[in-house]
Image: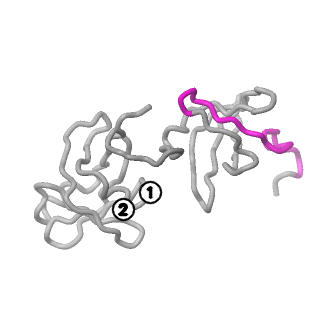
């Protein structure tokens, strides 16, 4: 599992006092505000103190140690910021979506391996897994009960109970 996880990306400055507008890649501004340090490399390099976070529309505004004016903030635009997994206190039963990537998708009843998860989207109330199937086709899987049986993240496995045809190739007439 990755130790440092993408949390947000600086997209522009905000005001003249060094605030930075970030696109959130984590749950929300409240989650990001739990961290005291952000990292500027995927390996945890170049740490910088996170002083303040506040929600701003569907993004967030952050204040960083040493970034006190617009020029310093402008230098951060385009920067991806990472959090250390060890600093995150997740409630029991919660996980990072990135931990699903690469997991095998296995039928809970038959043991058949359908493929691996290559993307997780949340277009509505539930997650949708993009699964790269064994034949290199792609299937979309709604991560809801009763289809999603169990996440075994330590074993890199997701147990499912798909409906008939969910992993079958499209037939003529299936697509308009």
Q: Quadrant of residue 40?
A: top left
Measure the C-alpha gap from mark 2 to mark 1: 8 Å
Q: Is residue 83 above or below residue 13?
A: above
Q: Quadrant of residue 28?
A: bottom left
Magenta highlight range: 153-173
SS category of the residue bearing label 1:
loop
**Image x and y of residue 111, in percent:** 76, 26
Closest to the observer, 27 or 61: 27
Q: Is residue 141 magenta?
A: no
Magenta region includes residue 169: yes
Q: Tell me what residue is drawn at x 69 percent, y 51 percent.
A: 144
Name the residue located 10 percent from the left edge and 55 percent from the top edge. Answer: 66
Residue 17 drawn at (x, y percent): 13, 69
Rendering coords of residue 159 (x, y %): 69, 35
Write down the residue under mark 1.
27
Which of 66 and 153 lies nearest the eye of the viewer?
153
Helix, strand or loop for the magenta stretch, by majority: loop
Residue contact at pointers 2 and 1, CB within 8 angstroms: yes
- Identify the disc placed on residue 119: none
Q: Residue furthest front?
A: 92
Quarter placement of the C terminus: bottom right
Residue on which disc 2 sits: 30
Q: Position of residue 1 (x, y in %)?
A: 44, 31
């Amino acid at each position: 599992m990755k130790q440092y996880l993408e949390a947000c990306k600086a997209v522009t400055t905000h005001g003249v006092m060094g605030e930075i507008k970030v696109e959130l890649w984590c749950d929300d501004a409240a989650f990001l505000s739990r961290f005291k340090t952000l990292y500027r490399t995927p390996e945890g390099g170049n740490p910088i103190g996170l002083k303040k976070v506040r929600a701003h529309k569907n993004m967030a505004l952050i204040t960083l140690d040493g970034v006190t004016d617009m020029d310093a903030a402008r230098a951060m635009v385009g920067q991806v910021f990472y959090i250390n997994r060890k600093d995150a206190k997740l409630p029991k039963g919660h996980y990072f979506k990135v931990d699903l990537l690469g997991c095998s998708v296995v039928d809970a009843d038959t043991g058949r391996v359908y493929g691996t998860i290559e993307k997780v989207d949340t277009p509505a109330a539930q997650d949708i897994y993009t699964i790269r199937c064994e034949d290199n086709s792609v299937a979309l899987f709604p991560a809801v009960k009763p289809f999603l049986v169990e996440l075994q993240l330590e074993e890199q496995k997701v147990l499912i109970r798909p409906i008939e045809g969910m992993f079958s190739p499209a037939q003529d007439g299936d697509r308009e």
